[in-house]
Amino acid sequence: MSVNNRDPLVVGGVIGDVLERFTRSIDLRVTYGQREVTNGLDIRPSQILNKPRVEIGGEDLRNFYTLVMVDPDVPSPSNPHLREYLHWLVTDIPATTGTTFGNEIVSYESPRPTSGIHRIVLVLFRQLGRQTVYEPGWRQQFNTREFAALYNLGLPVAAVYFNCQRDNGCGGRRN
Amino acid sequence: MLSSAKHQRKHRVSAPNKNKILNKVPSISSSSSPSHSQVQKRSLITMEEVWKDINLASIHHLNHHSQHPQHNHEPRFRSHNHQNQNPNSIFQDFLNRPLNLEPTIPTSLSGDATTVTALFGSSPLAPPATVLSLNSSACFEFLDNQDPLVTSNSNLHSHNHLTNVRSSDTPFEALVTSTCFGKKRGQESNEGSGNRHHKRMIKNRESAARSRARKQEYELELKVAHLKAENARLKRQQDQLKMAAANQQPKKNTLQRSSSALF
Protein backbone atom coordinates (compact mmCIF):
# COMPACT_ATOMS: atom_id res chain seq x y z
CA MET A 1 0.00 0.00 0.00
CA SER A 2 1.59 3.24 -1.07
CA VAL A 3 1.10 6.51 0.67
CA ASN A 4 -0.05 9.33 -1.55
CA ASN A 5 -1.08 12.90 -0.88
CA ARG A 6 -4.67 11.91 -0.47
CA ASP A 7 -3.80 9.56 2.31
CA PRO A 8 -5.87 10.65 5.29
CA LEU A 9 -2.79 10.73 7.47
CA VAL A 10 -1.21 13.23 5.12
CA VAL A 11 -4.35 15.26 4.63
CA GLY A 12 -4.89 15.43 8.36
CA GLY A 13 -1.34 16.53 8.91
CA VAL A 14 -0.44 13.55 11.05
CA ILE A 15 2.37 12.85 8.62
CA GLY A 16 4.46 15.85 9.34
CA ASP A 17 3.26 16.90 12.74
CA VAL A 18 3.78 13.56 14.40
CA LEU A 19 5.18 10.97 12.03
CA GLU A 20 7.34 10.56 9.03
CA ARG A 21 5.98 9.06 5.87
CA PHE A 22 5.79 5.34 6.18
CA THR A 23 4.34 2.31 4.49
CA ARG A 24 1.62 0.39 6.18
CA SER A 25 2.53 -3.17 6.70
CA ILE A 26 0.58 -4.36 9.69
CA ASP A 27 -3.15 -4.23 10.24
CA LEU A 28 -4.26 -2.02 13.09
CA ARG A 29 -7.82 -2.10 14.29
CA VAL A 30 -8.93 0.22 17.06
CA THR A 31 -12.43 -0.09 18.41
CA TYR A 32 -14.18 2.00 21.02
CA GLY A 33 -17.21 0.02 22.03
CA GLN A 34 -18.93 -0.68 18.78
CA ARG A 35 -17.25 2.03 16.77
CA GLU A 36 -14.20 1.20 14.78
CA VAL A 37 -11.85 4.09 14.46
CA THR A 38 -11.29 5.21 10.91
CA ASN A 39 -9.10 8.14 9.99
CA GLY A 40 -10.65 11.47 10.76
CA LEU A 41 -13.64 10.03 12.57
CA ASP A 42 -15.30 12.40 15.03
CA ILE A 43 -15.47 10.94 18.48
CA ARG A 44 -16.48 12.69 21.66
CA PRO A 45 -14.63 12.31 24.95
CA SER A 46 -17.63 10.63 26.52
CA GLN A 47 -17.24 7.79 24.04
CA ILE A 48 -13.58 7.18 24.75
CA LEU A 49 -13.50 7.15 28.51
CA ASN A 50 -12.14 3.64 28.57
CA LYS A 51 -9.29 2.21 26.60
CA PRO A 52 -10.21 0.84 23.19
CA ARG A 53 -9.81 -2.63 21.94
CA VAL A 54 -6.74 -2.78 19.77
CA GLU A 55 -6.05 -5.70 17.47
CA ILE A 56 -2.98 -5.89 15.34
CA GLY A 57 -2.05 -8.00 12.38
CA GLY A 58 1.22 -9.53 11.45
CA GLU A 59 1.94 -13.22 11.35
CA ASP A 60 4.78 -14.17 13.55
CA LEU A 61 4.02 -14.28 17.26
CA ARG A 62 7.66 -13.72 17.93
CA ASN A 63 7.43 -10.17 16.64
CA PHE A 64 6.58 -7.58 19.19
CA TYR A 65 5.00 -4.22 18.65
CA THR A 66 4.65 -0.96 20.50
CA LEU A 67 1.52 1.15 20.47
CA VAL A 68 1.69 4.88 21.14
CA MET A 69 -1.36 7.09 21.55
CA VAL A 70 -0.72 10.84 21.46
CA ASP A 71 -2.57 14.10 21.08
CA PRO A 72 -0.50 16.56 19.04
CA ASP A 73 -2.94 19.42 19.46
CA VAL A 74 -2.53 20.26 23.10
CA PRO A 75 -3.68 22.53 24.52
CA SER A 76 -5.32 23.74 21.32
CA PRO A 77 -4.72 23.09 17.64
CA SER A 78 -3.98 26.73 16.96
CA ASN A 79 -1.45 26.87 19.76
CA PRO A 80 -0.06 23.39 20.35
CA HIS A 81 2.80 24.40 22.57
CA LEU A 82 2.46 21.27 24.68
CA ARG A 83 2.64 18.94 21.70
CA GLU A 84 2.37 15.99 22.10
CA TYR A 85 0.41 14.61 25.02
CA LEU A 86 0.99 10.93 25.69
CA HIS A 87 -2.28 9.16 26.43
CA TRP A 88 -1.23 5.54 26.28
CA LEU A 89 1.88 3.47 25.78
CA VAL A 90 1.85 -0.30 25.41
CA THR A 91 4.87 -2.36 24.47
CA ASP A 92 5.66 -6.01 23.75
CA ILE A 93 2.42 -6.66 21.95
CA PRO A 94 2.81 -9.95 20.10
CA ALA A 95 1.72 -9.98 16.48
CA THR A 96 -1.86 -11.04 15.76
CA THR A 97 -2.86 -10.17 19.31
CA GLY A 98 -3.84 -6.97 21.01
CA THR A 99 -2.91 -4.55 23.71
CA THR A 100 -4.28 -6.77 26.41
CA PHE A 101 -1.33 -9.04 25.76
CA GLY A 102 1.18 -6.24 25.94
CA ASN A 103 2.94 -4.32 28.61
CA GLU A 104 1.15 -1.12 29.60
CA ILE A 105 4.00 1.24 30.31
CA VAL A 106 1.84 4.35 30.47
CA SER A 107 -1.74 3.76 31.47
CA TYR A 108 -4.61 4.89 29.30
CA GLU A 109 -5.76 8.42 30.02
CA SER A 110 -8.89 9.39 28.18
CA PRO A 111 -8.54 12.52 26.09
CA ARG A 112 -10.34 15.59 27.38
CA PRO A 113 -9.72 18.38 24.93
CA THR A 114 -10.72 21.73 26.30
CA SER A 115 -10.17 23.85 23.24
CA GLY A 116 -10.55 23.15 19.57
CA ILE A 117 -10.71 19.90 17.67
CA HIS A 118 -7.80 17.65 18.54
CA ARG A 119 -6.36 14.82 16.54
CA ILE A 120 -5.71 11.71 18.56
CA VAL A 121 -3.16 9.46 16.87
CA LEU A 122 -2.48 5.80 17.49
CA VAL A 123 0.81 4.59 16.08
CA LEU A 124 2.16 1.09 15.89
CA PHE A 125 5.86 0.38 15.80
CA ARG A 126 7.66 -2.86 15.40
CA GLN A 127 10.19 -3.68 18.07
CA LEU A 128 13.48 -5.32 17.33
CA GLY A 129 12.81 -7.69 20.14
CA ARG A 130 11.41 -7.63 23.59
CA GLN A 131 12.88 -4.56 25.15
CA THR A 132 12.64 -2.52 28.23
CA VAL A 133 10.95 0.78 27.64
CA TYR A 134 11.13 3.38 30.34
CA GLU A 135 8.10 5.50 30.90
CA PRO A 136 8.68 9.18 30.28
CA GLY A 137 8.64 11.51 33.25
CA TRP A 138 5.50 13.28 32.11
CA ARG A 139 2.84 12.94 29.47
CA GLN A 140 3.09 16.29 27.81
CA GLN A 141 5.66 17.41 25.32
CA PHE A 142 6.18 13.86 24.30
CA ASN A 143 7.88 13.39 20.96
CA THR A 144 6.95 10.27 19.05
CA ARG A 145 9.79 10.63 16.59
CA GLU A 146 12.34 10.92 19.35
CA PHE A 147 10.79 8.09 21.24
CA ALA A 148 11.03 5.85 18.19
CA ALA A 149 14.62 6.86 17.65
CA LEU A 150 15.50 6.27 21.26
CA TYR A 151 14.24 2.71 21.22
CA ASN A 152 15.24 1.92 17.64
CA LEU A 153 11.68 1.39 16.58
CA GLY A 154 12.19 2.75 13.08
CA LEU A 155 9.30 3.95 11.01
CA PRO A 156 5.75 3.15 12.00
CA VAL A 157 4.09 0.08 10.58
CA ALA A 158 0.58 1.35 11.06
CA ALA A 159 -1.26 4.40 12.29
CA VAL A 160 -4.76 5.71 12.62
CA TYR A 161 -6.16 8.90 14.01
CA PHE A 162 -9.48 10.40 14.94
CA ASN A 163 -10.80 13.83 15.80
CA CYS A 164 -11.94 14.67 19.28
CA GLN A 165 -13.57 17.79 20.66
CA ARG A 166 -15.24 18.53 23.92
CA ASP A 167 -18.72 17.27 24.51
CA ASN A 168 -20.43 20.52 25.29
CA GLY A 169 -19.95 23.77 23.45
CA CYS A 170 -16.68 25.23 22.30
CA GLY A 171 -15.17 26.15 25.63
CA GLY A 172 -15.39 29.88 25.11
CA ARG A 173 -13.23 32.29 23.26
CA ARG A 174 -9.59 32.19 23.98
CA ASN A 175 -7.05 34.96 23.51
CA MET B 1 10.79 67.48 19.02
CA LEU B 2 12.59 70.41 20.47
CA SER B 3 9.88 70.81 22.99
CA SER B 4 10.38 67.22 23.94
CA ALA B 5 13.99 67.90 24.72
CA LYS B 6 12.89 70.67 26.93
CA HIS B 7 10.47 68.44 28.63
CA GLN B 8 13.08 65.86 29.25
CA ARG B 9 15.33 68.34 30.87
CA LYS B 10 12.58 69.50 33.08
CA HIS B 11 11.80 66.00 33.85
CA ARG B 12 15.25 65.20 35.07
CA VAL B 13 15.47 68.28 37.09
CA SER B 14 12.28 67.56 38.85
CA ALA B 15 13.09 63.93 39.51
CA PRO B 16 14.32 64.33 43.05
CA ASN B 17 11.30 66.44 43.82
CA LYS B 18 9.10 63.75 42.48
CA ASN B 19 10.58 61.17 44.73
CA LYS B 20 10.02 63.30 47.69
CA ILE B 21 6.50 63.88 46.70
CA LEU B 22 5.87 60.22 46.27
CA ASN B 23 7.26 59.40 49.65
CA LYS B 24 4.83 61.75 51.15
CA VAL B 25 1.88 60.53 49.22
CA PRO B 26 0.83 57.78 51.59
CA SER B 27 0.74 60.19 54.44
CA ILE B 28 -1.66 62.30 52.50
CA SER B 29 -0.33 65.16 54.40
CA SER B 30 1.57 67.53 52.27
CA SER B 31 3.06 68.27 49.01
CA SER B 32 6.67 69.13 48.80
CA SER B 33 5.99 71.53 46.06
CA PRO B 34 5.17 74.85 47.61
CA SER B 35 3.28 76.03 44.62
CA HIS B 36 0.74 73.32 45.11
CA SER B 37 0.13 73.76 48.75
CA GLN B 38 -2.34 76.46 48.07
CA VAL B 39 -4.61 74.19 46.20
CA GLN B 40 -4.43 71.34 48.65
CA LYS B 41 -7.92 70.56 49.72
CA ARG B 42 -7.67 66.87 50.23
CA SER B 43 -5.31 64.06 49.52
CA LEU B 44 -6.62 63.65 46.05
CA ILE B 45 -5.39 67.01 45.06
CA THR B 46 -2.02 66.26 46.45
CA MET B 47 -1.88 63.16 44.36
CA GLU B 48 -2.90 65.07 41.36
CA GLU B 49 -0.29 67.59 41.99
CA VAL B 50 2.23 64.89 42.17
CA TRP B 51 1.26 63.49 38.87
CA LYS B 52 0.95 66.85 37.36
CA ASP B 53 4.42 67.63 38.47
CA ILE B 54 5.63 64.54 36.80
CA ASN B 55 3.99 65.68 33.68
CA LEU B 56 6.56 66.48 31.14
CA ALA B 57 4.46 69.27 29.85
CA SER B 58 5.27 70.84 33.12
CA ILE B 59 5.07 74.27 31.70
CA HIS B 60 1.39 73.98 32.35
CA HIS B 61 1.64 72.87 35.91
CA LEU B 62 1.24 76.39 37.08
CA ASN B 63 -1.99 76.55 35.18
CA HIS B 64 -3.18 73.36 36.72
CA HIS B 65 -3.72 74.99 40.05
CA SER B 66 -6.77 76.71 38.87
CA GLN B 67 -7.99 73.70 37.02
CA HIS B 68 -7.75 71.23 39.81
CA PRO B 69 -11.25 71.45 41.14
CA GLN B 70 -12.52 70.82 37.69
CA HIS B 71 -10.20 68.00 36.95
CA ASN B 72 -11.18 66.16 40.03
CA HIS B 73 -14.67 65.71 38.84
CA GLU B 74 -14.38 65.43 35.15
CA PRO B 75 -13.39 62.37 33.32
CA ARG B 76 -10.24 63.21 31.62
CA PHE B 77 -9.87 60.64 28.97
CA ARG B 78 -9.47 63.29 26.40
CA SER B 79 -8.80 66.33 28.46
CA HIS B 80 -5.10 66.41 28.12
CA ASN B 81 -5.41 68.72 25.23
CA HIS B 82 -4.05 71.43 27.33
CA GLN B 83 -1.09 69.39 28.26
CA ASN B 84 -0.08 68.07 24.98
CA GLN B 85 -0.37 69.04 21.44
CA ASN B 86 -1.48 65.67 20.21
CA PRO B 87 -4.04 64.26 22.62
CA ASN B 88 -5.24 61.51 20.44
CA SER B 89 -1.85 60.21 19.56
CA ILE B 90 -0.29 60.38 22.94
CA PHE B 91 -0.63 56.80 23.74
CA GLN B 92 0.04 55.66 20.26
CA ASP B 93 3.15 57.72 20.07
CA PHE B 94 4.27 56.38 23.32
CA LEU B 95 3.78 52.83 22.25
CA ASN B 96 5.25 53.36 18.86
CA ARG B 97 8.24 55.04 20.23
CA PRO B 98 11.35 52.92 19.91
CA LEU B 99 12.98 51.88 23.11
CA ASN B 100 15.90 54.21 22.92
CA LEU B 101 15.32 55.59 26.32
CA GLU B 102 17.97 57.74 27.81
CA PRO B 103 19.60 56.41 30.92
CA THR B 104 18.18 59.17 33.03
CA ILE B 105 14.68 58.42 32.04
CA PRO B 106 14.27 55.40 34.27
CA THR B 107 15.26 57.52 37.18
CA SER B 108 12.85 60.19 36.30
CA LEU B 109 10.33 57.53 35.65
CA SER B 110 10.52 56.20 39.12
CA GLY B 111 7.75 58.54 39.90
CA ASP B 112 6.19 58.06 36.55
CA ALA B 113 6.48 54.36 36.78
CA THR B 114 4.36 54.33 39.82
CA THR B 115 1.75 56.24 38.01
CA VAL B 116 1.81 53.88 35.12
CA THR B 117 1.54 51.06 37.54
CA ALA B 118 -1.58 52.63 38.77
CA LEU B 119 -2.85 52.25 35.29
CA PHE B 120 -2.01 48.60 35.25
CA GLY B 121 -3.11 48.02 38.76
CA SER B 122 -6.56 49.29 38.07
CA SER B 123 -8.94 46.86 36.56
CA PRO B 124 -10.45 47.63 33.21
CA LEU B 125 -13.67 48.36 34.99
CA ALA B 126 -12.18 51.12 37.07
CA PRO B 127 -11.57 54.41 35.44
CA PRO B 128 -8.08 54.70 34.07
CA ALA B 129 -6.01 55.94 36.87
CA THR B 130 -3.18 57.94 35.61
CA VAL B 131 -1.95 59.64 32.60
CA LEU B 132 1.75 59.84 32.92
CA SER B 133 4.22 61.72 30.91
CA LEU B 134 7.01 59.26 30.58
CA ASN B 135 8.53 61.08 27.75
CA SER B 136 7.97 64.17 25.81
CA SER B 137 5.78 62.33 23.42
CA ALA B 138 3.54 60.72 25.98
CA CYS B 139 1.36 62.23 28.59
CA PHE B 140 -0.66 60.65 31.33
CA GLU B 141 -3.10 62.07 33.78
CA PHE B 142 -4.13 60.91 37.14
CA LEU B 143 -7.80 60.24 36.94
CA ASP B 144 -8.66 58.01 39.78
CA ASN B 145 -10.78 59.93 42.20
CA GLN B 146 -11.87 57.07 44.30
CA ASP B 147 -8.99 55.81 46.27
CA PRO B 148 -5.80 57.63 45.68
CA LEU B 149 -4.21 56.18 48.76
CA VAL B 150 -4.59 52.66 47.63
CA THR B 151 -3.51 53.53 44.18
CA SER B 152 -0.47 55.34 45.35
CA ASN B 153 0.51 52.50 47.60
CA SER B 154 0.23 50.05 44.79
CA ASN B 155 2.24 52.39 42.70
CA LEU B 156 5.02 52.45 45.17
CA HIS B 157 5.07 48.75 45.55
CA SER B 158 5.23 47.93 41.96
CA HIS B 159 7.26 50.67 40.47
CA ASN B 160 10.31 48.51 40.52
CA HIS B 161 8.48 45.92 38.57
CA LEU B 162 7.42 48.42 36.05
CA THR B 163 10.88 49.74 35.41
CA ASN B 164 11.81 46.22 34.60
CA VAL B 165 8.90 45.94 32.31
CA ARG B 166 9.98 49.03 30.60
CA SER B 167 12.97 47.26 29.25
CA SER B 168 10.97 45.46 26.66
CA ASP B 169 8.30 46.75 24.46
CA THR B 170 6.11 43.75 24.12
CA PRO B 171 5.13 43.10 27.72
CA PHE B 172 4.49 46.76 28.19
CA GLU B 173 2.27 46.79 25.19
CA ALA B 174 0.59 43.70 26.42
CA LEU B 175 -0.01 45.27 29.78
CA VAL B 176 -1.31 48.39 28.21
CA THR B 177 -3.65 46.66 25.87
CA SER B 178 -4.89 44.38 28.56
CA THR B 179 -5.69 47.15 30.96
CA CYS B 180 -7.88 49.02 28.53
CA PHE B 181 -7.58 52.64 29.35
CA GLY B 182 -11.10 53.40 28.41
CA LYS B 183 -10.15 54.02 24.84
CA LYS B 184 -10.99 51.74 22.05
CA ARG B 185 -8.27 49.24 21.37
CA GLY B 186 -7.82 50.59 17.93
CA GLN B 187 -6.71 53.87 19.34
CA GLU B 188 -4.18 52.45 21.68
CA SER B 189 -1.59 51.51 19.19
CA ASN B 190 -1.81 51.27 15.49
CA GLU B 191 1.00 48.78 15.41
CA GLY B 192 -0.46 46.65 18.19
CA SER B 193 -3.89 46.33 16.68
CA GLY B 194 -2.40 45.64 13.29
CA ASN B 195 -0.33 42.86 14.74
CA ARG B 196 -3.32 41.49 16.58
CA HIS B 197 -5.41 41.53 13.45
CA HIS B 198 -2.65 39.92 11.51
CA LYS B 199 -2.14 37.18 14.03
CA ARG B 200 -5.83 36.59 14.31
CA MET B 201 -6.09 36.35 10.56
CA ILE B 202 -3.28 33.86 10.35
CA LYS B 203 -4.77 31.75 13.09
CA ASN B 204 -8.12 31.90 11.42
CA ARG B 205 -6.64 30.76 8.15
CA GLU B 206 -4.90 27.87 9.79
CA SER B 207 -8.11 26.90 11.47
CA ALA B 208 -9.91 27.11 8.17
CA ALA B 209 -7.25 24.95 6.54
CA ARG B 210 -7.65 22.37 9.29
CA SER B 211 -11.38 22.42 8.80
CA ARG B 212 -10.98 21.89 5.09
CA ALA B 213 -8.59 19.05 5.75
CA ARG B 214 -11.08 17.47 8.11
CA LYS B 215 -13.82 17.87 5.56
CA GLN B 216 -11.67 16.30 2.89
CA GLU B 217 -10.88 13.47 5.26
CA TYR B 218 -14.54 12.94 5.88
CA GLU B 219 -15.22 12.83 2.15
CA LEU B 220 -12.34 10.43 1.62
CA GLU B 221 -13.54 8.15 4.34
CA LEU B 222 -17.02 8.19 2.92
CA LYS B 223 -15.61 7.34 -0.46
CA VAL B 224 -13.54 4.54 1.01
CA ALA B 225 -16.56 3.11 2.73
CA HIS B 226 -18.57 3.42 -0.43
CA LEU B 227 -15.90 1.79 -2.52
CA LYS B 228 -15.47 -1.00 -0.05
CA ALA B 229 -19.16 -1.69 -0.14
CA GLU B 230 -19.22 -1.63 -3.91
CA ASN B 231 -16.20 -3.88 -4.04
CA ALA B 232 -17.88 -6.39 -1.80
CA ARG B 233 -21.01 -6.24 -3.88
CA LEU B 234 -19.15 -6.75 -7.11
CA LYS B 235 -17.25 -9.67 -5.67
CA ARG B 236 -20.42 -11.32 -4.60
CA GLN B 237 -21.85 -10.71 -8.02
CA GLN B 238 -18.81 -12.20 -9.61
CA ASP B 239 -19.06 -15.28 -7.43
CA GLN B 240 -22.69 -15.69 -8.34
CA LEU B 241 -21.89 -15.44 -12.02
CA LYS B 242 -19.13 -17.97 -11.64
CA MET B 243 -21.50 -20.33 -9.93
CA ALA B 244 -24.06 -19.81 -12.66
CA ALA B 245 -21.49 -20.35 -15.33
CA ALA B 246 -20.19 -23.47 -13.64
CA ASN B 247 -23.67 -24.86 -13.41
CA GLN B 248 -24.25 -24.44 -17.07
CA GLN B 249 -21.35 -26.22 -18.52
CA PRO B 250 -20.95 -25.34 -22.15
CA LYS B 251 -21.23 -28.35 -24.46
CA LYS B 252 -18.38 -27.16 -26.52
CA ASN B 253 -15.04 -26.65 -24.94
CA THR B 254 -14.04 -24.00 -27.28
CA LEU B 255 -15.52 -20.61 -27.10
CA GLN B 256 -17.55 -19.53 -30.05
CA ARG B 257 -17.25 -16.10 -31.31
CA SER B 258 -19.65 -14.25 -33.38
CA SER B 259 -18.39 -13.11 -36.66
CA SER B 260 -16.70 -9.80 -36.38
CA ALA B 261 -18.52 -7.12 -38.22
CA LEU B 262 -16.87 -4.66 -40.47
CA PHE B 263 -18.52 -1.69 -38.95
Image (cartoon, rainbow, N blue to C red):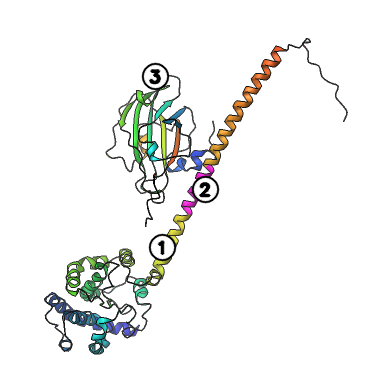
Q: Kindly indicate whether the residues beneath marks 2 and 3 are on one polypeptide chain.
A: no
Q: Foreground mark, 3 or 1?
A: 1
Circle 1 crowding by C-alpha within 10 Å: few under 14, some 14–19, many from 20: few
Q: Which amino acid does label 1 sit on?
A: Arg
Crowd rating for badge 3 (residues with CA inside 10 Å; few <14, some 14–19, many 20+): few
Q: Which amino acid does label 2 sit on?
A: Arg
Which chain is home to disc 2? B
Q: Is the magenta stretch mostly helix, strand or loop?
A: helix
Question: Which of the 4 image quarters holds residue A83?
Answer: top left
**Region of the chain picked out in magenta, as a range:** B205-216
Q: What element carries label 3?
A: loop
Residue type at the position of mark 3: Arg
The residue identified by callout 2 is B212
CA–CA distance in space, label 2 to label 3: 42 Å
Whether residue A150 is visible to the viewer of this picture, yes or no, is: no
Residue A54 lies, with reference to residue A84, above or below; the image says above
The residue that label 3 is drawn on is A62
Tags 1 and 2 both on a single chain: yes
Residue wearing tag 1 = B196
